[in-house]
């Protein structure tokens, strides 16, 4: 796992926004534990909801800085079908510790993939993640509607996307 994490560190700071892609390009989340939320919050791509999948880590300050913004989006658009899912692959206790520290700043679903299967698929096999933090927006029909660093226009994109969809 250390070799994999060092490889990910090399990616920090490289940002890319992609155009909409068919859902066949986006793999199913591999989840070993739901840390916050429930199975009902996760759903399936193309189920009519909009999913914001945040690839993050407790150990990286820019990821932590995005937490209040993601909570704000979840609160603002939950009634319109937006579901924010924070995905990590580290020790679940590290996530729980940060969750306790964040309190009401972190009010969205958190899932863990302790085996790291999903991150390996999207970063190593498919080369879909180009830096951290990284977010995928999956549209109502299951398409990848947006991808990139959340500071590079996520909120503006969601505001427009929700109005149009």
Image: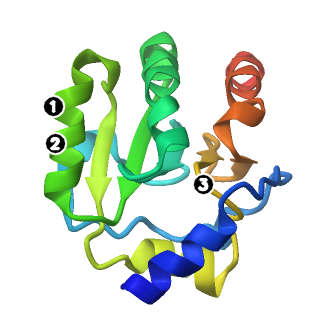
Residue 73 located left or right of residue 2: right
User: On the picture, is 62 further left or further right than 37?
Assistant: right
Distance of label 3 from label 1 (alpha carbons) = 22 Å
Q: Is residue 10 above or below residue 7?
A: above
Please tell me the numbered disc located at residue 100: 1
Secondary structure type for disc 3: loop
SS at badge 1: helix
Inspect this view and state whether residue 112 appears. yes
Residue with the mark numbered 3: 132
Instruction: Work out whether mark 3 precedes mark 1 in sequence or the reverse, and give the earlier one.
Output: 1
Which residue is tagged 2?
97
Q: Secondary structure at mark 2?
A: helix
Report if the CB atoms under discs 2 and 1 are less than 8 Å apart: yes
Q: Position of residue 34 (x, y in %)?
A: 20, 52
Place of residue 72 in the rendered image (x, y in percent of width and height, measured from the top left): 48, 15
Q: Nearer the viewer, residue 89 or 94?
A: 94
Distance (Cα) linking label 2 and label 1? 5 Å
45 or 71: nearer the viewer: 71
């Amino acid at each position: 796992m250390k070799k994999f994490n060092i490889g990910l560190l090399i990616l920090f700071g490289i940002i890319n926004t992609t155009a909409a892609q068919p859902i066949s390009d986006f793999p199913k989340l591999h989840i070993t534990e739901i840390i916050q939320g429930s199975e009902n919050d996760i759903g399936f791509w193309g189920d009519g909801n909009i999913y914001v999948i945040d690839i993050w880590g407790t150990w990286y300050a820019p990821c932590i800085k995005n937490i209040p913004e993601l909570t704000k989006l979840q609160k603002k658009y939950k009634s319109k079908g937006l579901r924010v899912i924070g995905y990590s692959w580290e020790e679940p206790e590290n996530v729980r510790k940060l969750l306790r520290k964040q309190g009401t700043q972190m009010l969205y679903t958190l899932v863990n993939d302790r085996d790291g299967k999903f991150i390996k698929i999207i970063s190593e096999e498919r080369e879909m993640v180009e830096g951290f933090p990284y977010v995928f927006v999956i549209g109502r029909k299951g398409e990848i509607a947006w991808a990139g660093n959340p500071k590079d226009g996520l909120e503006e994109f969601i505001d427009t996307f929700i109005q149009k969809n």
